[in-house]
Amino acid sequence: MERLLEGNRRFVEGKSIHPNQSVERRGQLSNGQSPFAAVLCCSDSRTAPEIVFDQGLGDLFVLRVAGNILNDQILGSLEYAAEYLGNGLIVVLGHKKCGAVAATIGDGKVSGHIGSLIKAIYPAITNADDKSDVDSVCKANIRLMVDQLKTSQPILEEFVKQGKIKVAGAFYNLDTGKVDLL
């Protein structure tokens, strides 16, 4: 986690070093990967974790979906990262002014498969400090996803109990660029 937060400090200060982005690094990774962290984050184009955390190729195993929600495919991917890639950290990264969360709080008039996102985020409203505030609901959603990951059976719950993996929630401020742990 410290490595991620140090990268975020560089990003916030405008001193990103863009590590592990060389031709040599690309070659080193051609036969395999061992990312040190997995990040479940929103698809929002302003929240790319490799940039926000100033990381490079092979450093992060990233899963992006609007509202940083869980489904079987996301869980399977995170289990893969933990079991087969040796990943020891999962970060659920939500962000300020999340549109998927705003849609969930809104009037409920959505079309197509967007409703599946709303359905997944909706339980966070009941746990939010301010049920009408997007950022409050977003933070509640992050905490809910962290709790679900920690208790996901059969793999992640066991890895958490054994201390093989840590799961943390974080909130990205679009205005400042800073990531805060929840």
Image (spheres, rainbow, N blue to C red):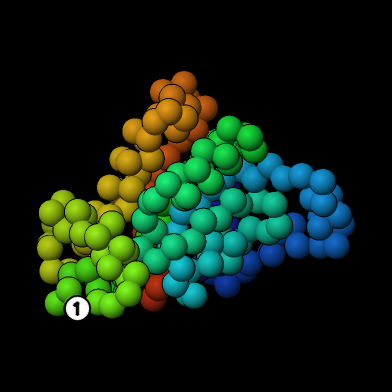
Q: Nearer the viewer, residue 38 or 155?
A: 155
Across and down, in percent, residue 85 comes to 64, 38
Is residue 66 positioned above or below 62 on the image?
Answer: below
110 displayed left or right of 153:
left
Label 1, secondary structure: give it.
loop
Give the class, few, some or many, for how many residues have Cα within 10 Å of label 1's Cα (few <14, many ≥20): few
- Residue 46 screen position, x and y as percent: 48, 74
Q: Is residue 164 above or below residue 7?
A: above
Q: Residue at x 19, y 78 (%)?
A: 109
Q: Position of residue 153 (x, y in %)?
A: 39, 31
Where is 143 relative to 131, above or below? above
Total tally of numbered discs in the picture: 1
Please identify the quarter of the rendering in which residue 134 is found. Answer: bottom left
| Residue plotted at (46% across, 54% down) | 40
Image quadrant assignment for residue 167: top left
Which three-letter amino acid code belongs to the residue tagged 1?
A: Lys
